[in-house]
Amino acid sequence: MKLITVDIGSFNIKTSEGVILENRFELDNNAEVFGAEVLNYDGNNYFFGRGEFNKTFSKVHKEIEVPLFYSLAKSNVSGKINLILHLPASQMTMKNLIIDRLQGHEFTYKVNSVEYKTIFNKVGVLREGWSSFYSLSKRNDGLIAIMDIGGRTTDIFTFNNGINEKEKSLAIGMMDVFSDIADKLNGQGENRRLEDIHKLLANEIINIDEFEDVIYKYAAKIINDVKVTIDNLGDYKIYLTGGGAEYFINVLDKKFRVEIMNNNLCSNCTGSYNIGKAKGLDKWWRLD
């Protein structure tokens, strides 16, 4: 039984096969499909790399199937599979809304005119950030914190000798940062959207160091808000993960012992794959 784990983020889709894709698409049944990245599903064409990022806060209310099917095809995975997805800790109470949409169902779709049929045997949902802990090679010795800075949320987990102590999910993410940067540029006479900032940074047209005040603003908010649950974060060796890790490292390392996790964009997928494999999901067993 094939096991795959997928992290459908606000900016990127990541899989345990090492695939990283931009999570931006638009429905267009009239456009020419030649030369484009297109998922055809349920009679509709979805063009990837176009349109706006989905800014809906609750992941369970997003169009999960479209980015999921696209990422599975790009990972060359189909047939009968076991799947692990991820949610912020604050949204885990709604995980069955995702599981019920997928588990036990068969789907047929095309990506770039190639047809795929996928049956989801077992579907599990694990916490973002918490899963990343299990990607660490050394995790059972001492005080460790995971800080997963995503597009819409930041999730923090603390561990003592491998045992999860506390967790906190905050409604702060890179979309907040990019929106503020866009506002600053627009105040200088430019015409920028959130989507532009992601592209400008990725292509080194602008540098995040030019907007250090924005990073400081949200880093301070994260540090202050997490005190409600974790008031001694400085005791822990902090591992940063998620798309925001590279942007926050130079601010957070002024106050904490912190480093970016290896392969931080895919660390949730790696960790959840290790969990799924330990539970036998690469075979015929179930995820409890």
Image: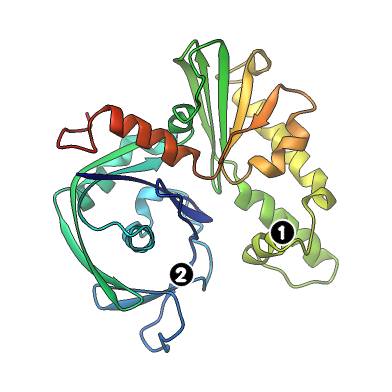
The image quadrant of residue 91 is top left
Counting every numbered tag in the picture gives 2
- Compared across the picture, whether 111 is left or right of 163 comes to left
Residue tagged by mark 1? Answer: 201
The image quadrant of residue 199 is bottom right
Marked residue nearer the N-terminal end (1 or 2): 2
Q: Looking at the figure, which quarter contains the N terminus?
A: top left
Above or below, 30 relative to 66:
below
Q: Looking at the figure, which quarter contains the C terminus?
A: top left
The picture places residue 79, in percent across and down from the top left corner, at 19, 57
Marker disc for residue 232? none
Give the class, few, some or many, for how many residues have Cα within 10 Å of label 1's Cα (few <14, many ≥20): few
The picture places residue 250, in percent across and down from the top left corner, at 77, 36
* C-alpha separation, residue under disc 1 versus residue under disc 2: 20 Å
Check disc 1 and report its element: helix, strand or loop.
helix
Q: Which circle, 1 or 2, is nearer the viewer?
A: 1
- Compared across the picture, whether 143 is left or right of 259 comes to left
State the residue at coordinates (43%, 32%).
131
Amino acid type at mark 2: Phe
Above or below, 24 relative to 35:
above
Marker disc for residue 25? 2
